[in-house]
Each structure stands twice: as structure tokens, then as C-alpha cells.
Image: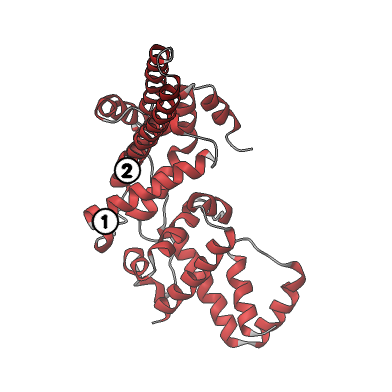
Amino acid sequence: MNCREAQEQILASFEGDVFPGQRDALDKHLSECATCSEFTALQSQLDLFLREQIIAPQLSASFRAAVRAKIASKSSHMLPAWLPDVAYVAGSVAGLALCAVLLPFAATTVIEMGASVAIVVYLLQTFLRTALQQSIE
Amino acid sequence: MADEDVQRLLCERRYGLAFELILQRYEKKVFYLAYSILKESANAEDVAQDVFVKLWQVLPLYDGRAAVSTWLYTISRNTALSALRAKSYRNTLPFEECDPPAVDPEPGLRRLQLKEVLPRLSQIEQEIVTLFYLQQCSVEDVAGMLDVPAGTVKSHLHRARRRLAELMRS
């Protein structure tokens, strides 16, 4: 085992990655290599330092209540998520109604118009969905 | 599959129940993720609240392609990074909750403060180191929160440890 491999093993050990097959080789290397022994000591000190300094903060007890209050106050100012679905259904119903009225008089025109309305409605709901996503992100 | 119950509720359009489950399950992790970026608990909590408000708004758009947690963490990280940019926290990094070390460290370490050394790492390394210790040293948890492979978390951690050790030695 060379120094590079030994140091990677030492770093991995702080993540709980212990490789039993290489433990003996690592111990042997450390007993012979002052640089890696010093590296181990320094990394152990660093690990202790980080454990002590990075302390989990506490969420306040009112966190959930605050979230619900924000939702209640903000939801009226944002685009409702159901808007694209409503636009899609409303557009489809309007298109169908128009087709039903005009079908007896101009069948070809109605087919062309039906296809056009379907495309417009699809684009409209896609646009609304994108706008909604952007308003969130 | 994780969050099966949440996904089922979303399919049934029972958004209120699904939201409550997500809130209970992920409030702490979202808060920690925001804290790892903002380094200040009050602001992290504000951001976490905003994240859940956004989640409530987009729940009906959930299409099941990604895990709910992945989706939530993406919103969390984007929101926290926007807050960081908006208020230029980068230069302050308060870490105001840190207590002095309980045990007596080596002389070389005694002079070090986390708020001094952490900014010397890249943004992603700072997040990973902070989350790793907040999450009881679970690489898998950190990888899930940042939506990166566990191997990437490990390599960032190793690089960060080497860099911090250099700073300690100097």
C-alpha cells in the first residue's frame, strides 16, 4: 500500500467505510510512514473539530403553524395549480360546442377547425403550466 | 418504494393529507439543507417555510416521474441559493449557533473557527461537509438531499478534508 492509497483509506474511514481486507495493510503502512501517521492524527482532530462545531439547529415549535399561515395568506396571490386543467377542459368544451353547431353546415371546415382548436387549447395549457412552474421556481 | 403513501394520496388528489405527511417527514431535512447553504438558522427557517408554501402550490402538478423527496430538495436548494444570492450571505457566514468546543483540541486547532475555514471551501463542499455532520455522518442521506451519487459526496468530502487539514496545518 502506498501513501495515496493509505490516505484515501483513512479518509474513507470517517464515512464508515472500513475495508477489513485492507486494515492490516493500512496498519502496517502507518507503523512505517510518519507522513501518513501525521495525516491520520490531523484528520482525527479535524473530524472532532467538525463534530463539535457543526451543531444541528432547532426548528422553532411554531414552524408548521407558520407554514400554514403563509399558505393561507399567499395562496390567493399565486396562480392556482388547477388553472391549466380548467383551461384545457373549458377550451375542449368550447371547441366541441362550436363543432356541434357548425357540423351540419360545413363538415370539412369543422374538421379543420376542430384540429386547430385542439392545438390552440394544448398550447394554452402548456403555456399556463410553464408559467406556473416559473412562478414557483 | 419511499413515500409510497404520499404518492398514493397524490394520485387520489388528496393534496391536504399528502402535504401534511411531507411536512412532518421532511421539515427537518429541508431546514438542514437551507441551513447548510445560509449558515443562519432564522433565515434557514424562513426559507424552509417558503419551500413548503411553494410545494403546496405545485403539488397538483406532481407527475410521479421523480421521487417526492428529490422534487422537494430541488425546490429547497434553489430557494436557499436564491436567498443566498439575494442577501449576499456569502461574506458573513454567521454560524451563530456554534458553541465553543467542549473538549480541548490540539493547539493548532484552537485558533480555528468554523466560520473562518468553511468559506475557504467551494459552495458544494461547504454544503456537503455541513450536511454530513448534521445528518449523523450519513453519506447516503446527503447524496439523496443533493441528488448526486454517493461517490460524488465522498470525493467532495475527501477534497474538503484535505483542504481543511492544510488550513489547520498552516
The one nearer the camera, B137 or B12, is B12
The residue carrying pointer 1 sits among few (fewer than 14), some (14 to 19) or many (20 or more) residues within 10 Å by Cα, namely: few
- Residue denoted by label 2: B47
What's the CA distance linking mark 2 and mark 1? 13 Å
Is residue A19 found left or right of B108 in the rendered image? right
Image quadrant occupied by the N terminus of chain B: top right
What chain letter is assigned to the residue under label 2?
B
Residue at image position (49%, 27%) is B18
The one nearer the camera, A62 or B9, is B9
What chain letter is assigned to the residue under label 1?
B
Image coordinates of residue B111 in percent, x first then y, are 34, 72
**For the residues carrying marks 2 and 1, which lies nearer the camera in this image?**
1
| Residue B134 vertical position relative to residue B50 in the rendered view, above or below | below
Image coordinates of residue B32 in percent, x first then y, are 42, 47
Residue at image position (68%, 83%) is A29
- Residue denoted by label 1: B85
Image coordinates of residue A115 in percent, x first then y, are 44, 29
| Residue B104 vertical position relative to residue A131 in the rendered view, above or below | below
Residue at image position (56%, 54%) is B138
Q: Amino acid at mark 1?
A: Arg
Q: Is residue B39 visible?
A: no
Q: Amino acid at mark 2?
A: Val
Q: Is residue B89 visible?
A: yes
User: In the structure shown, which secondary structural element does the residue marked by tag 1 occupy?
Assistant: helix
Which quadrant of the view contains residue A120? top left
Image coordinates of residue B36 in percent, x first then y, are 39, 54
The one nearer the camera, B82 or A105, is A105
